[in-house]
Amino acid sequence: MKKTFHHVCIQTNNYDKSLDFYTRIMGFEIEKETKNFHNRDYNTWLKLGDFYIELQTPKKGDTLNPWSKYNAGIVHMCFSVDSVEEEYKRIKSLGYNDFKVKNDQEIYLVEDGYLFKVKAPEGTEIEIR
C-alpha cells in the first residue's frame, strides 16, 4: 500500500481572516466550502498543488484555545519557494505584517539557508524557505 500525505486540518475562531490569509496571502484555492458541516459553521478544503488544508470553525458552543508554541502536535508547516526575499516582499505588498522576528530580523539564516516565518490569523506558524 502506498501512503502519501493528504492534508493538515486547521481550526480557527476567525474563519474570514484565516480564509483570506490562506487564499490571498498564501495562494491556496478553495476546493470546496461547506456551511453547517457537522455542527460547525464552515468546513473548507483549500488546495495548493497537491497539498490540502482542511480549514474549519469550532463546533457550535466550543471555543478554541489561543495558539501556543508549547502545544503538542504540529508546531509549524513549511513551504519551499524559489526566492525567500521575493516571497517576503510579495506578502508585505499585500499588507500582511505578522512576521516572527529573530535577532532583530524578519528574514534570517538558519543552517543551510534563509527563511522567514509568518503567523496566520488563527495562530499557525508558516515557515517560508
Image: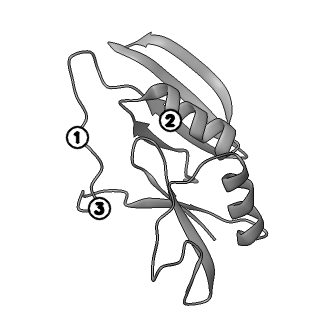
The residue wearing badge 3 is: 69
Q: Is residue 5 above or below residue 29?
A: below
The residue wearing badge 1 is: 65
* Residue drawn at x 47%, y 22% as measured from the top left: 43
Which one is in front, 120 or 59? 120
Tell whether 12 sits left or right of 8. left
The residue wearing badge 2 is: 18
Give the quarter of the figure containing the C terminus.
bottom right
* Residue drawn at x 22%, y 28% as measured from the top left: 63
Q: Amino acid at mark 1?
A: Asn
Upstream in the sequence, badge 1 or badge 2?
2
Which one is in front, 35 or 86? 86
Tell whether 16 sits left or right of 75. right
* Residue drawn at x 21%, y 24% as measured from the top left: 62
Q: Amino acid at mark 3?
A: Lys
Task: Find numbered disc 1 in the image and state the secondary structure of the residue it sits on.
Answer: loop
Visible in this render: residue 3?
Answer: yes
Q: Is residue 52 above or below residue 92?
A: above
Residue 96 in the image, given as x and y percentages of width and height: 60, 48
Q: CA distance from mark 3 to mark 2?
A: 19 Å
Mark 1 and 2 residues: CB-CB less than 8 Å, in contact?
no
Which one is in front, 32 or 124? 124
Upstream in the sequence, badge 3 or badge 2?
2
Q: How is the image coloured?
A: one colour
